[in-house]
Amino acid sequence: MHGVFCLPVLPDYGVTHQWLRELKRGGQKTLIGVYFRLPDDELVSVGRYNQPHEQMTAAEACAFVLKAPDPLGFEVIVPRAIGPDEVRKVRSVPQVAGWRCMPEAHRKPLCQCSWCTRGEFNARRRKRYYARRYDARYD
């Protein structure tokens, strides 16, 4: 799906900035927050990051994420570029907010396949540990 991936600013700072830690896994050192405003009636797509998305207005998407029992992992996709007149604020954000790899990652082991651990420190040692602990085979 193409577009601008974003989240509405919600009362819960952790939910609003949940993607920060996952984006940092890609090697970026410092990330900033770009806050913008969309018209309430603009069509966007909303859903969890690994599931089908629904199309609805921006106002409905905010309510949808706000009312979700577990809003971690949701994303809103704006199918166009954001114009400079829509940007309201650009600011630095704490660099440790968010979840790692996926929501609820602390409840289950991380994937240890060669694709998911490419270029990570201690990947080989972690694969051996997970294989012994969870009786699994990783390539």
Image (cartoon, grey):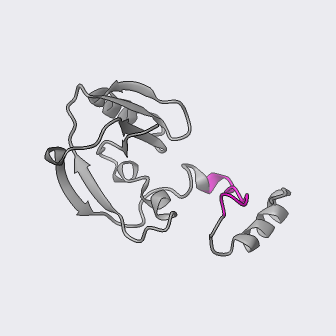
Residue 33 in the image: above or below residue 6: below
What's the residue at 56%, 55% (across, down)? 101
What's the residue at 55%, 34% (across, down)? 51
Q: Is residue 39 magenta?
A: no
What's the residue at 56%, 39% (across, down)? 50
Most foreground residue, 114 or 60:
114
Write the start and end of the magenta stretch as one range: 106-117
Residue 37 in the image: above or below residue 139: above
**Residue 98 percent location from the top left of the image:** 45, 57
Q: Is residue 108 magenta?
A: yes
**Residue 2 percent location from the top left of the image:** 42, 39
Most foreground residue, 134 or 76:
76
**Residue 76 percent location from the top left of the image:** 38, 38
Q: Is residue 120 left or right of residue 4?
A: right
| Overall secondary structure of the magenta section | loop
**Residue 52 percent location from the top left of the image:** 53, 30
- The residue at the far left in this view is 85
